[in-house]
Amino acid sequence: MLFIMVRRDEGEGQRGMILAAKKLPVSGADMFPLDFEVTGRDVMMQGTRLWGPVRVEARVDTDGDALSKLPGDLTGGPIAGEVNKDGLQINIDTAL
């Protein structure tokens, strides 16, 4: 599974509150590069507004459990961005 997480940007080195997440099945390496969009439908808690500066990260998770982080999982980010801006690119290039 591919998890894309959007957190409030609290500054460099700080983990902000998670605002939204998207879970996508991974069919293989040929599905990358992948265009993605995280919207208000992906917010974690109803009523949460997806706006302002954020940090986006991605993880290809071998067991499909968003909470576990196992050796062999691949990660990318976090990348600073702004909600409603196009062109954010995350390189998933770090193995746990």
Image: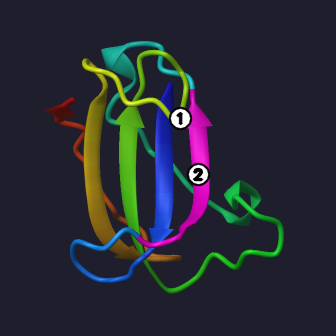
Q: Quadrant of residue 51?
A: bottom right
Q: Residue at x 70, y 58 (%)?
A: 44
- Estimate the x, y position of residue 76 in percent, counting from the top left: 26, 45
In the rendered view, tell whether residue 58 sits above or below residue 42. Answer: above
- Estimate the x, y position of residue 68 in percent, counting from the top left: 46, 30
> Between marks 1 and 2, how big is the CA–CA gap?
10 Å
Tag of residue 21:
2
* Mark 2 surroundings: few (<14), some (14-19) or many (≥20) residues within 10 A: many
Q: Are marks 1 and 2 in contact (CB under 8 Å)?
A: yes
Q: Amino acid at mark 2?
A: Ala
Mark 2, secondary structure of its residue: strand
Q: Residue at x 83, y 66 (%)?
A: 46
Q: Earlier in the sequence, mark 1 or mark 2?
A: 2
Instruction: Write the start and end of the magenta stretch as one range.
Output: 16-24
Q: Residue at x 34, y 29 (%)?
A: 32
Whether residue 31 sits left or right of residue 51 in the image: it is left
Q: Which residue is mark 1?
A: 66
In the rendered view, tell whether residue 38 sits above or below residue 81. Answer: above
- Estimate the x, y position of residue 77 in percent, counting from the top left: 26, 54
Q: Residue furthest right?
A: 46
Mark 1, secondary structure of its residue: loop
Q: Amino acid at mark 1?
A: Ala
Q: Quadrant of residue 72?
A: top left
Whether residue 92 sits left or right of residue 66 in the image: it is left
